[in-house]
Image (spheres, rainbow, N blue to C red):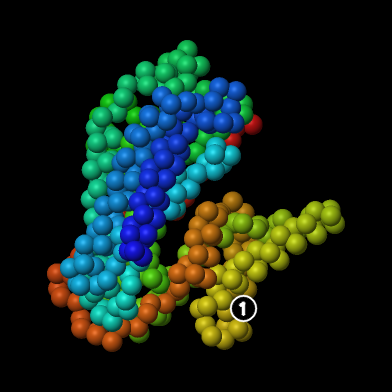
Amino acid sequence: MKQNRTLLIQLTLFIVTIITTTLTGAEWIFGNSFFFSSKPMGWEEFLTGFQYSIPFLGVLTVHEFGHYFVAKKHKTEVTLPYYIPLWLGGLSSTFGTMGAFIRIKERISSRVKYFDIGISGPLAGFVAALVVLWYGFTHLPSLDYVFELFPVLKQFGMEYGHFLETSPDYFSVKLGNSLLFSFFENYVAVGDLPHPYLYTNYPIIFAGYLSLFFTALNLFPIGQLDGGHILYGLIGDKAFNIVSPVLFTGFVFYAGLGTFNAHEFQTVDSEAFLDLLWKFVLYIVFNYLCFSRISEKLVTNWLITLSVIAIQLIITYFYPTVEGYSGFLAFGLMIGRFLGIYHPPTYDNQPLTPGRKILGWIALLIFILCFTPKPFTIIQNV
C-alpha cells in the first residue's frame, strides 16, 4: 500500500513537471505570459512549449535513470525519480523544474559504489544533452522564425540585432558561453544562428544549454554532489576532505566577488551609507551561513568568512569592474548548509580500477567543458 502511494506521488510529480516545463517553455519561446499580458497565450502556444519540455525533461530523465539502473546493478535499494515542478505563473522566469532526485534508502559503505552511482547520471545525461544540442544546431530555422515570433523585427532584416541592442526598454536573458556550447556554435551549426539575445526563444537549443548547465552543477567536485562522489572515489577520504572545502571556499568567493565594491563605502550620503552598511551586514551573515559547517570551530568559520569578504573588497578596490556571478550564491548556500561540503565516510575503501579512474577524470573534464562562469546575463536596455 505504501509503495503504491509512493508511485502515485512520483507519477503525479512527473505529470505536473511536464505541465510546468511546457508552460515555461511557451513563455520562453514567445516572450509572453499565459495570464499577465495584454494578449495572453493560449492552447496553441502551450503545445509549442513541448519543443522545450520534451528535450529538457528527456535529458533530466536520462540522468536520473543513469543513477537508478547503476544503483540497481549494485543491488542498492533506491527509489524511482522524484521530479520537482516549478512555475510561478509568469510572475517571474523559471525553467519549469528544480530538477529531480532519486532517494537511496540504505547506507552506501563502498567507495566504488559511490563512484559508480555518482558518475552514471552525469555521463548518461551528458550524452543525451549532446544529442539535443546536435539536433538543435543542425536544424536551425530560417530567420523567418524570428520574424514570426517578433513581427516588429522584420523591417530590419539581417540587421535586427542592432535593434535588439539599442531598442529602449528591451529585456532579454543572454546565455553564457561554455567551451562546449561555443564549439556547437562555431563548428556544428547549420543555417542562420540567432542573435545571442534570442537563444532562449529557440527551445531545443535552450533545453540543450540548460542540460549542459545542470550537468556542470552536478559535476562540481564538492561534497555530496555527483562530482563530489567522483572526486572522492578518485582521491580518497583524506585528500577529498581537504580539497572539497578549498574548492567550496573558492566557489563562494567567486560567486560573491563584486557584490560589494570597496569604492561604494566612500559615499558622503549618511542615509545611503547606512543602507549600504545594513545590506553589507546581511551579506556577511549570508557568507557565514555558507561557511558555518566547514569546521567545528566557530572562530575558524568566522575567520574564513571575513577573510573571503576582505579579499573581495581589496580586489574591487584595485579592479572596480571585476565581478563574479551572484546567481551562484544560492547554490553555495544550498551546498554549505544542506548538501554538505564533506563526503560520508566509507568502510570499503578498495581503490578504483584503472578504467574507473579514466572515466572519473573524463567526467571532471566534462565539467570544465560544460561550465560557464556567467551562465545567464540579464539584458535590460534603457
User: Quick check: 347 above or below 83?
Assistant: below
State how many labels appear: 1
User: Quick check: 202 above or below 176?
Assistant: above
Q: Is residue 141 left or right of residue 255?
A: left
Residue found at the very far right of the displayed protein: 270
Front residue of 132 and 8: 8
Quarter-of-image position of residue 216? bottom left
Residue 3 appears anywhere in the view = yes
| Residue occupying the point 48% across, 48% down | 86
Give percent across and percent down for residue 237.
33, 82
User: Quick check: 23 above or below 339?
Assistant: above
Quarter-of-image position of residue 115? bottom left
Per the image, label 1 sits on a secondary structure element best described as helix
| Residue occupying the point 50% across, 26% down | 41
Residue found at the very far front of the displayed protein: 1
Give percent across and percent down for residue 97.
43, 48
- What quarter of the picture does the C terminus occupy? top right
Give percent across and percent down for residue 312.
59, 64
User: Quick check: 358 above or below 43?
Assistant: below
| Residue occupying the point 42% across, 18% down | 148
Mark 1 packing: few (<14 Cα in 10 Å), some, or many (20+)?
A: some
Quarter-of-image position of residue 169? top right
Amino acid bearing label 1? Trp
Residue 372 appears anywhere in the view = no
Give percent across and percent down for residue 310.
63, 69
Front residue of 268 and 361: 361
Where does label 1 land, which residue? 302
| Residue occupying the point 47% across, 21% down | 150
Q: Is residue 287 left or right of residue 136?
A: right
- What quarter of the picture does the N terminus occupy? bottom left
